[in-house]
């Protein structure tokens, strides 16, 4: 449009200049047509002819006014108007019709500039209209051509590209007559790109399927694992947990929540010990493992876990912990049970002979000084015989309770077998042993009532004592010495029931050897 | 140069012959005459034009002038107007045709033959006519000669 406007302006200027010079020529020509008349009029001094000539001139629209002037006459038309409009006249000399070298008069012709300009404008307007029309026509034609040759194929290509799902077999159709054009190249390049995309999509899909397959397996593995496993951020928030973990949490009576404190501390009965041990391992950059007891509301049924904790650092430098808690409660119980069976007496719950011997060996190994008191019950056989084994068992439980109750914290009671008990007393002199044994004896000789029997039953005991390491550092010798002393005491059970405690002496030991 | 020198006398002769023949061919000289009794002794070419082409209808002395055209001798008439205004007869006729309507300007009076012109010059004191120089009689007065 700017081009059209500029061109239009240029056209107007050119037309105006042209019209001016044309008008000058026209005026010249117009004058020529009346020149003869004017000449004759001047020659004959004929006003009518002069009028005819001047009127002939001003008849033309291009001439605003005209006048003829000679010595003998003057005629004008509209000259005042022309002068008021400040129009400069063109002057033509009127020659003698028969003596051309003589000048008879002068004709002034005033061009009608307003008309000329109007004419120029009209012409240039017409020109401009045709220019505009031409521009519009050319524009439309160019548009149509462009549309059919470029835009339409581009649109079709664009539409088909829009419809194409990348990664499929679909391709853009080559527009007609464009196989060698830039559009054709674009289509070819795009199709090549689509080929590559499809290739990559296929590869990626395969990869994704493989990953999905693996992930499914891993998930299955993780979800169905019997071990409670969590992936935990450093701040204690659990990122990933499996069903077994939730089951474990529910088992110990806690609610399922986002986190359980640093390293799951809220779950453990002694979190400080656990954390200390774990951080030591982490400091050495190792994974930590240990067996810990979990908190439990139901005290009778303790839950033990084997905790395996490994710190993980992601590629982004974030720190995580993988914690696996294997419920080992049942194993722990089994072990405890086994240990109890091995070292404790099933009836009374105190150490049995096996446990006692282990204990004695341990004390000896650590060189703890102690007194070994061997106790034998008097009257037990009678109870067993009269009231039966159950009553005997009750007596044994009673005695064991008395022993446990009356001895000091560091002393140990052992059921050595049958109605024989052993006390390991932390004492090195006879006086303190005596004091301890008397306490025990006071408990044991209390009247004992069986169920439904109004008559009390009395149990007494005989005791032989040997000292470690004063008398021997050998267990069987110690036992034997105590046994000999106890046997001596046993002699007094009827005659002097209060003299029930005998100390072994080195002499008798020596004598026995 | 030598060529030119040889030719220049010849060229001069040819040119001389040509000019002679053309003078010979331009027939006789024309003169403008009046009635013997006319006061006017001499006229200039411009004055003759003014009278024959209708500007004035009187001699400079104020007496009426009647220019005479010859109808049946186009050669004389043509030569006269050619010499006077430098125009062929057709143009002169056209000039008069244009002025006929105004009625204010009169064309010259018409006589048929050169004899008629002679007669008119004798009879009419205002007459003014053109004749070959050889036709001039003592009853006419020559007021202008064409060179």
Image: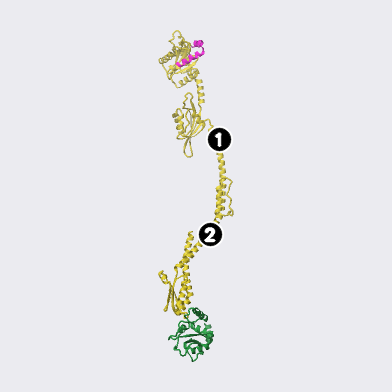
Chain colours: A yellow, B green
Q: Distance between the residues labelled 2 and 1?
A: 72 Å
Sort mark 1 into few (<14), some (14-19) or many (20+) by Cα contacts within 10 Å.
Answer: few
Closest to the observer, A315 or A390: A390
Residue A459 in picture, x, y percent from top left: 46, 11
Q: Do the residues labelled 2 and 1 touch (CB within 8 Å)?
A: no
Sort mark 2 into few (<14), some (14-19) or many (20+) by Cα contacts within 10 Å.
Answer: few
* Boundaries of the magenta span: A380-402
**Prevailing SS of the magenta stretch:** helix
- At horizontal 49% and vertical 60% (from top left) the residue drawn is A4
Circle 2 sits in a helix, a strand or a loop, which is it? helix
Mark number displayed over residue A217: 1
Q: Which chain letter goes with mark 2?
A: A
- At horizontal 58% and vertical 50% (from top left) the residue drawn is A173
Q: In the rendered image, which residue does mark 2 sit on?
A: A137
* Residue A386: in magenta span: yes
Task: Specify whether A154 is left or right of A462.
Answer: right
């Amino acid at each position: 449009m700017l081009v059209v406007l500029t061109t239009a302006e240029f056209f107007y200027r050119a037309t105006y200049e042209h019209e001016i010079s044309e008008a000058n020529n026209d005026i010249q020509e117009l004058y020529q047509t009346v020149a003869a008349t004017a000449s004759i009029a001047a020659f004959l001094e004929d006003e009518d002819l002069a009028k005819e000539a001047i009127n002939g001139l001003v008849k033309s629209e291009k001439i605003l006014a005209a006048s003829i002037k000679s010595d003998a006459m003057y005629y004008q038309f509209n000259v005042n108007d022309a002068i008021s409009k400040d129009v400069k006249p063109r002057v033509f000399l009127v020659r003698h019709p028969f003596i051309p070298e003589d000048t008879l008069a002068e004709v002034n012709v005033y061009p009608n500039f307003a008309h000329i300009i109007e004419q120029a404008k009209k012409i240039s307007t017409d020109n401009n209209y045709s220019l505009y029309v031409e521009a519009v026509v050319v524009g439309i034609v160019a548009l149509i051509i462009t549309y059919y040759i470029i835009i339409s194929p581009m649109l079709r290509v664009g539409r088909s590209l829009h419809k194409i799902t990348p990664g499929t077999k679909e391709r853009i159709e080559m527009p007609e007559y464009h196989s060698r054009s830039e559009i054709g190249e674009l289509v070819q390049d795009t199709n090549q790109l689509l080929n590559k995309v499809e290739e990559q999509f296929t590869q990626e899909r395969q990869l994704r399927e493989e990953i999905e397959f693996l992930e499914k397996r891993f998930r299955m593995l993780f979800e169905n694992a019997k071990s409670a496993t969590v992936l935990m951020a450093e701040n204690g928030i659990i990122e990933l947990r499996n069903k077994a973990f939730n089951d474990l949490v529910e088992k110990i009576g806690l609610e399922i929540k986002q986190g359980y404190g640093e390293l799951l501390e809220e779950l453990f009965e002694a979190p400080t010990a656990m954390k200390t041990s774990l951080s030591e391992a982490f400091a050495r950059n190792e994974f930590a493992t240990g067996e810990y007891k979990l908190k439990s509301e139901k005290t009778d049924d303790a839950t033990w876990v084997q905790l395996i904790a490994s710190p993980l650092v992601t590629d982004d430098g974030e720190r995580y912990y993988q914690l696996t808690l294997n419920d080992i409660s049942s194993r722990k119980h089994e072990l405890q049970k086994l240990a109890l069976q091995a070292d404790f007496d099933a009836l009374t719950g105190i150490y049995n002979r096996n446990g006692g011997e282990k204990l004695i060996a341990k004390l000896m190994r650590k060189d703890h000084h102690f007194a070994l008191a061997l106790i034998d019950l008097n009257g037990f056989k009678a109870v067993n015989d009269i009231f039966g084994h159950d009553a005997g068992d009750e007596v044994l439980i009673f005695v064991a309770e008395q022993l446990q109750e009356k001895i000091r914290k560091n002393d140990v009671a052992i059921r050595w077998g049958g109605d024989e008990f052993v006390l390991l007393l932390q004492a090195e002199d006879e006086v303190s042993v005596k004091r301890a044994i008397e306490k025990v004896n006071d408990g044991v000789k209390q009247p004992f009532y069986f169920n439904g029997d109004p008559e009390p039953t009395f149990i007494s005991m005989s005791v032989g004592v040997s000292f470690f390491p004063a008398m021997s550092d050998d267990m069987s010798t110690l036992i034997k010495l105590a046994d000999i002393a106890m046997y001596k005491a046993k002699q007094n059970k009827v005659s002097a029931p209060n003299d029930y405690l005998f100390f072994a002496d080195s002499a008798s030991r020596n004598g026995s050897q | 140069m030598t060529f030119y020198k040889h030719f220049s006398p010849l060229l001069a002769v040819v040119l001389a012959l040509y000019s002679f023949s053309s003078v010979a061919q331009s027939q006789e000289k024309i003169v403008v005459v009046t009635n013997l009794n006319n006061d006017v002794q001499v006229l200039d070419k411009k004055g003759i034009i003014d009278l024959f082409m209708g500007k004035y209808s009187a001699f400079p002395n104020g007496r009426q002038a009647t220019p005479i055209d010859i109808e049946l001798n186009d050669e004389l008439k043509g030569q006269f107007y050619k010499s006077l205004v430098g125009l062929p007869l057709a143009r002169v006729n056209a000039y008069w045709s244009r002025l006929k309507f105004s009625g204010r300007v009169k064309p010259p009076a018409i006589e048929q033959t050169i004899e008629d012109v002679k007669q008119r010059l004798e009879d009419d004191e205002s007459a003014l006519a053109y004749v070959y120089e050889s036709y001039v009689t003592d009853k006419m007065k020559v007021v202008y000669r064409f060179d």
